[in-house]
Image (tube, rainbow, N blue to C red):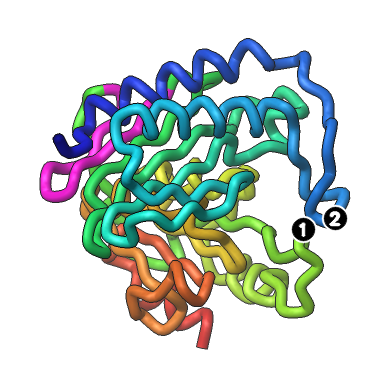
Amino acid sequence: MEPNINFLLKIVTKAGNELLKFSGKVKEYQIKKGNPKDIVTEADKYIEKFIINEINKKFPEHTIIAEESGKSLINPEKIWYIDPIDGTTNFLHNFPIYGISIGYQEFNEMKLAAIYFPALKELFYAEKGKGAYKNKKRIFVSNQTDINNALLATGFACLRSGLKENNLKYFNKIITQVRDIRRTGSATFDLCSVATGRLDGFWEINLSSWDVMAGFLIVQEAGGKVTDFNDTPNFNQNRQIVASNGKIHKDFLKFFK
């Protein structure tokens, strides 16, 4: 038996309902990453454990890469990427843009993805070669062709990590050249927003695989494009990501030269 999209949808929606039970009640209980800006809550741990247990029941021989648990490399040809709460700071402050992200990769190709934003009741999902959907409705990227009229989004995971190389230089360069830039605090939300056409593009640096792999498939299946700053598909390896509707991608990449 192989994983299917219905399996993902069942897990991610149930996990979302569980997460809502923590809303307004959770407290920061552990800061384990050496930076007080990078928050881990009891909800992160609980939701991740729930998802991993559900996957292990059906597919104990698969590899799982998860934000809080790290990597359990069992089968490198069948890999699950799990982010239990993307937008933990938003969640902690009852700001409704936070989501649960699950992606499945087989033989180095993303096959399935589901991302659920429970406070917004927005469920995004995709299956390789079968399109992308939001709440059962097919979605597509925007038709914007002019980078100067584009609405973009970005984030600052680099600042939370205290990296010397950060995103501010790109932000300062780009903000004067486009219609505007949004900062939602959730990379998965930004990727889904590109897929559904409410954003024309998104970029960020220093993201991890669990942040982007599910969203990558959803953007791709909605007709968009995802690369690194050099227009190669190595965004997961070098931790640079540029996602767009495809039509502005060439001009978008010029900002990073």
Q: To which residue does mark 2 refer?
A: 35
Query: Which residue extends farthest bottom?
Result: 257
Magenta-drawn stretch contains 142? no
Contact between marks 2 and 1 (CB within 8 A): the answer is yes
Nearest the viewer among 174 and 203 is 203
Name the secondary structure under disc 2: loop
Q: In the rendered image, which residue does mark 1 sit on?
A: 160
Q: Earlier in the sequence, mark 2 or mark 1?
A: 2
Please tell me which residue lies in front, 67 or 96.
Answer: 67
**Percent of width and height locating residue 248:** 34, 68
Looking at the rendering, in which quadrant would you find the N terminus?
Answer: top left
- For the point 23% across and 23% down, which residue is it? 136
Q: Is residue 151 visible?
A: no
> Which stretch did the figure color magenta?
122-135
Q: Residue at x 24, y 55 (%)?
A: 106
Q: How dense is the environment of label 1, judged by Cα within 10 Å: few (below 14), some, or many (20 and up)?
A: some
Q: Which secondary structure class fits the magenta region best?
A: strand
Percent position of residue 143, x then y: 26, 53
Question: For residue 240, which numbered disc appears in the image?
Answer: none
Image point 25% across, 33% down: which residue? 133
Q: Quadrant of residue 125?
A: top left
Q: Position of residue 202 (x, y in %)?
A: 48, 58
- Residue displayed at 35% across by 64% down: 226
Residue lying at the far top of the rendered structure: 21
Residue 155 falls in image quadrant: bottom right
Tag 1: amino acid? Arg
